[in-house]
Image (cartoon, rainbow, N blue to C red):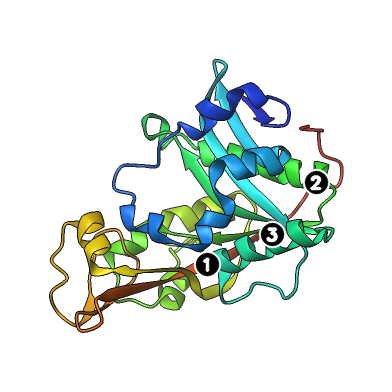
Amino acid sequence: MEIVTLAQRPDLVEAVYAIPYPPGSPRFMQGSLTSLLVRRRRLARRWPHLVVALLEGGSPVARGVMVPFRERSPFPARGWDEVAVWAAEDALDGVAPDTAGALEIAVHPSCQARGLSSAVLAGMRDAVAAAGLSSLVIPVRPPDKASVPLVSMGDYASAVRPDGLPVDRWLRTHVRAGGVIEGVASCSATVQAPLADWREWTGLPFDRDGPAVVPGALAPVLVSTVDDYAVYVEANVWVSHRVPEHPARLG
């Protein structure tokens, strides 16, 4: 196994972003307007030193993607969306960043359940330190929360096993890797779109007003047939990771 950044290996851009999300990842998240600010090729061009790839046999099997920003307030309620906007604002305004925010970690579906996420997190921490940034924060999206969409994220994230580790497997991965759960970003990611888009993304009729439970959604989607739109507001969990003082240079 080897960790590299796209600054080191720009030839791997296509292979790194060809790693698919796990089966069942919700299509409707592509409707996030904020995500347009941090599309893949933009990140690869702008901040290649903050896109980390885990290689096995020379081929990427996992990636970690981050953006730099100047912290305005710690762990904002608008989580993922806020981080993406801050990074775009600071890049346009020439503001020197001090923090990295992770936007995604993806492991190839064929390599799941091998503990590779922890290796990616370690590489991300080193890349952040090599960039001269002081902290790494992550608005974590625990996908298993979709099985209990009516449970609040606060209650879900605070549930622990007898050994004190989180019940959620993805939060547990972060804690085992040294992450600290800092709180809940109550409106971390938002998707708003006409009902036709929602029907295409989900295959559901969206023919009734009110909350609708959608596969893959961590909370109900709010539907208005009168106004022909639905809005999804997703809470995430803020996790911070300690950045090493003397990292290996990752490029």
Asked whether 92 or 20 is in front, the reply is: 92
Q: Which residue is mark 1?
A: 237
Numbered disc 3: secondary structure? helix
Q: Residue at x 71, y 46 (%)?
A: 125
Badge 3: how crowded within 10 Å, few (<14), some, or many (20+)? many
Please state which amino acid type lies under the numbered disc 2.
Ala
Residue at the disc numbered 2: 129
Total numbered labels placed on residues in the image: 3
Q: Residues within 10 Å of mark 2 (few under 14, many from 20)?
A: many
Which amino acid does the dot numbered 1 rest on? Val
Secondary structure of residue under mark 1? strand
The quarter in which the N terminus is drawn is: top right
Which callout, 3 or 1, points to the residue nearer the camera? Answer: 3
Identify residue type, mark 3.
Ala
Residues under labels 3 and 1: Cα distance?
19 Å
Circle 3 sits on which residue? 87
From this viewpoint, which residue is outermost toward the top?
A: 57
Measuring 72% from the left and 76% from the top, which residue is drawn there? 73
Residue 94 is labelled as none
- Residue 99 figure quarter: bottom right
CB within 8 Å, label 2 to label 1: no
Residue 70 in the image: state x and y as whole percent.
Answer: 78, 64
> Which residue is drawn at the image coordinates 55% and 43% (left, top)?
40
Q: Earlier in the sequence, mark 3 or mark 1?
A: 3
Q: Disc 2 to disc 3, how far (Cα)?
A: 17 Å
Q: Which comes sooner in the sequence, label 2 or label 3?
A: 3
Dot 1 alpha-carbon crowd within 10 angstroms: few under 14, some 14 to 19, many 20 or more: many
The residue depicted at 68 percent of the width and 65 percent of the height is 86
Q: For the residues marked 2 and 1, what is the alpha-carbon distance in whole angstroms?
A: 23 Å
